[in-house]
Amino acid sequence: MAKPKHDAIDLSRQHLGTVYAKALLGAADKAGQAQQVLEELESLVEDVLTKLPQLEAALSSPRLGLEEKRALIDRAFGGRMSVTLTHFLKVVAQHGRLDALRPMLRAAKKLYNEMRGRVEVTVQTAYPMSNPLRERIAGKLKQLLGREVELKAEIKEDLLGGLVVRIGDTVYDGSLAAGLRQMQEVTLEHTRQSIRESLERFSVST
């Protein structure tokens, strides 16, 4: 069966993101700015482009010429980010790939974690995790994986209880190891407590 076209496009953008991310981190690390540049790129994508879709559309549009895009980069970001990232954006513009900044960011974060011996782990729970619970889960995962952990929390209400752990492309349902089953019980109790508190607030309000 032929592979869906959109899957091929996603893989192509993923590969493209990795190629550019390696170049960016290589230049940034050489300048001793790897963490700073990564934080700047993340802020550019998450704080600026997400909130200003018209700016993202202009940077991605083939109707805007290269010199116009370079001028737009200078006006929008000049003096607000490192020279390394500004130059990188202009190089990306020259190759007509400013539409792929998001996969570049994802790849850069993954590569940076690998450079620092860390692993990014996504933990999904039905309710927001308290800071003590986040710390306990991160500590347990660090112990089980033998690596520093960058924990990203997501809320997935249809889980009802328990937790789901994603490490790279692999998803675990709480059975990553025997130790995680204990964490699942902790999360279940946290869920039960959240439900009890919600019911109590409902009773008071009615």
Image (tube, grey):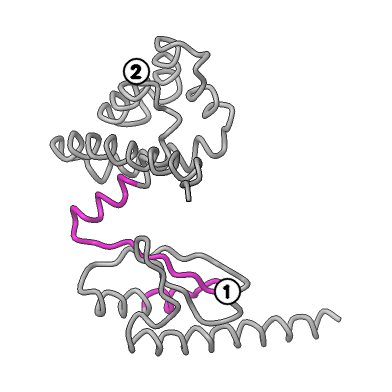
Determine which quarter of the picture holds residue 32.
top left
Crowding near pointer 1: few (<14 within 10 Å), some, many (20+)?
A: many
Determine which quarter of the picture holds residue 171.
bottom left
Task: State the SS at label 2.
Answer: helix
* Residue occupying image coordinates x 48% and y 51%: 1
Task: State the SS at label 1.
Answer: loop
Crowding near pointer 2: few (<14 within 10 Å), some, many (20+)?
A: some
Q: Which residue is mark 2?
A: 94
Distance between the alpha carbons at the discs numbered 1 and 2: 44 Å
Determine which quarter of the picture holds residue 82.
top left
Q: Is 123 covered by the magenta stretch?
A: yes
Q: Nearer the viewer, residue 108 or 52?
A: 108
Residue 119 position within the rendered picture, expressed as x and y whole percent measured from the top left = 28, 63
For residue 188, above or below residue 167: below
Residue 34 position within the rendered picture, expressed as x and y whole percent measured from the top left = 22, 42
* Bounds of the magenta segment: 107-135
Q: Nearer the viewer, residue 66 or 148?
A: 66
Q: Which residue is mark 1?
A: 127
For residue 176, above or below residue 111: below
Q: Is 119 covered by the magenta stretch?
A: yes
Q: Quadrant of the C terminus?
A: bottom right
Mark 2 belongs to which amino acid? Gln
* Residue occupying image coordinates x 29% and y 67%: 149
